[in-house]
Image: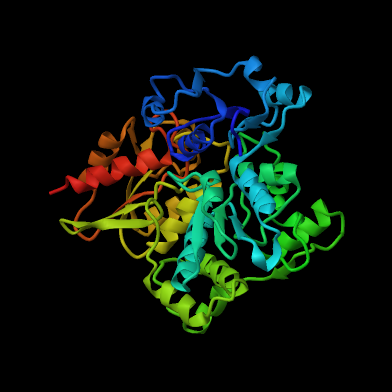
Amino acid sequence: MFRGKKITLMGLGLLGRGIGDARFFASQGAELIVTDLKTEAELAPAIAALAEFPNIVYHLGGHRLEDFDGRDLIIRAPNAPLDSPFLAHARAHGVPIEMDAALFVKLCGKKFSGGAGGVTIVGVTGTRGKSTTTHLIYEMARAAGRQTYLGGNERDTATLPFIEKVVAGDIVILELDSWQLQGFEEDRMSPHIAVWTNFMPDHINYYHGDMDRYFADKAAIARFQRAGDFFIAPREIKDRIEAKILNGATLAGKWVEPADGGGAADGWEIALPGEHNRANAACAIAASRCLDISDDVIKTVLKTFTGLPNRLELLGEKNGIAFYNDSNATTPDATLAALRTLVGHPIVLIAGGSDKELDFTELAHELAKLHVKKSLKAMVLFEGKASEKLKALLPKNFPAPTMASNMQTAFEAARAAATPGDIILLSPGATSFGIFKNEYDRGDQFRRAVEVVR
C-alpha cells in the first residue's frame, strides 16, 4: 500500500499512537522520516520500540522545512499549530497532508464499497465525556457480539493498522478531539454515526481565544454526513452547526437528541457516578440503538461499566481515606463535575498546573462554598499559571493552598490534611506540562503513590 512511498511523520510522542503509525508505515516498506520537537533523549522509549526498522530516519529536537517537500505524504501531528510554517511549506509544494484517523477512514472507503457491506465508523467528540462515551459504545457493541475496534484518541493505540484487519460488517469506534477532526474537515468526510457530547471552553491557548474556530473544527464530525447517517448531540449543538456552519442549511444525517439517560431516567441502573455520566450514558445509548443493539445488552453494560482510568477513578480506600484519580480533568468544568459528584464527603483536593487560558471563576466560587460548608478540608496546588489564576480568585478568608512542584510533595501534603472518612481527590482542572509528561503520567504517578500507602 505504501511501499517505496516517501512519508514524513510529524510527531512521534510517547503515548503509543505515533509509535503505532511509524510501525505501520515502516512495516509497509515506506521511506519514513520521523520528526518531533522533542529530543532523542526525551523520545528514547519510543525510538527503542521501533529499533527493528532500518527504513526510519529520525530528525528530532525540531522540524526541518526540507522534510516537508519532495515527499509523497505528510502525516501531521494532531496539535500542530494552525499557522505551522512546516505544513504551509508542504501545501505550497503540493504535498498531501493527512491525519491518522481521517486517513484510516479514507482507506476504508477505498477498501470497501460502503453502505451496509462496508465498515461502520462511529466518531465521538465533545469537550468532556468523549472517552467515557466512546468506551461505553465499544463495550455495548462487543457485548452484542459485533466485531469492534477502538481507536482515534486512544492511549497506546494507533488507528491506521486497523486497515489490515477490518472486514465488511465491522464497527470502528473513534474518539476524536478537535485537532483530529481537522483531518476530517480537510478530507470533507464525517463518520456514519457521529456523537457530540457537549461543548465548553477549552484549548483557548491553541485557538488564540477563538472558540468559534474550536466549534468549527468539532463540527466536521457531522457536517459532511450523508442521508442514512446519524448525528447524536444536544439540540443547541445541532442548531448552532446549521445556523453558523451551514448558513441555515439542514444537516444531512438524521439528528438524534440523547434523552436524559436515554431511558436511564425511567429506572435504568448506571454504575458510573455523577450527573455528567448520565449525560454520557444517554449519548452511548442513542448511538448503540443506531447500531441496532438491543436495550437488554445496553442495560447490562450500563450496570457493569464502572469507568476508565484517570477519570474519577476510585483507586481504593486506605486507613479510612478514599483516593480518587481524576487526572484527565484538564478543565475547570471537569473538576467541578468531580466535586459535585463526590459532595457529601470531606475532600482534600489536589489541583492546578499549567494554563490553557481558561476561566477559573466558577471553580473558585464552588471551592469557596465547599469550604464554608466544611466539605473542602484543604487544597494542594501544583505550581503553574493556572494555579496562580485560581488563587487570585479565591476569597481572602480561604485557607492558603499548599503549593507543590511534584507529585510526591502534593501527595504527602494531601495525606497530612486528610483523616479517616475523607476523600483525597486528584482533579487538576488544568494541564500537566512543566511538571508531568502529560495527564496520563500525572495519573500514573498518583496511582503509584496510593499503591505504597500502608
Residue at image point 54% right, 18% down: 62
Residue at image point 50% right, 62% down: 148
Q: Is residue 253 visible?
A: yes
- In this image, 242 relative to 150: left or right? right
- In this image, 343 relative to 252: left or right? left
Colour scheme of the picture: rainbow
Foreground of the two, 91 or 28: 28
- In this image, 15 relative to 406: left or right? right
Quadrant where the image shows the N terminus? top right
Image coordinates of residue 305 in percent, x first then y, are 39, 67
Q: Is residue 212 visible?
A: no
Image coordinates of residue 411 in percent, x first then y, are 26, 41
Q: Residue furthest left?
A: 454
Q: Where, by quadrant of the figure, is residue 169 drawn?
A: bottom right
Q: Residue furthest bottom?
A: 266
Foreground of the two, 94 or 322: 94
Image coordinates of residue 340 in percent, x first then y, are 44, 61
Query: In the picture shown, does residue 390 fall above or below 247?
Result: above
Query: In the picture shown, does residue 37 fall above or below 99?
Result: above
Residue at image point 47% right, 60% down: 135
Q: How many marks?
A: 0
Foreground of the two, 39 or 35: 35
Image coordinates of residue 126 in percent, x first then y, are 59, 54
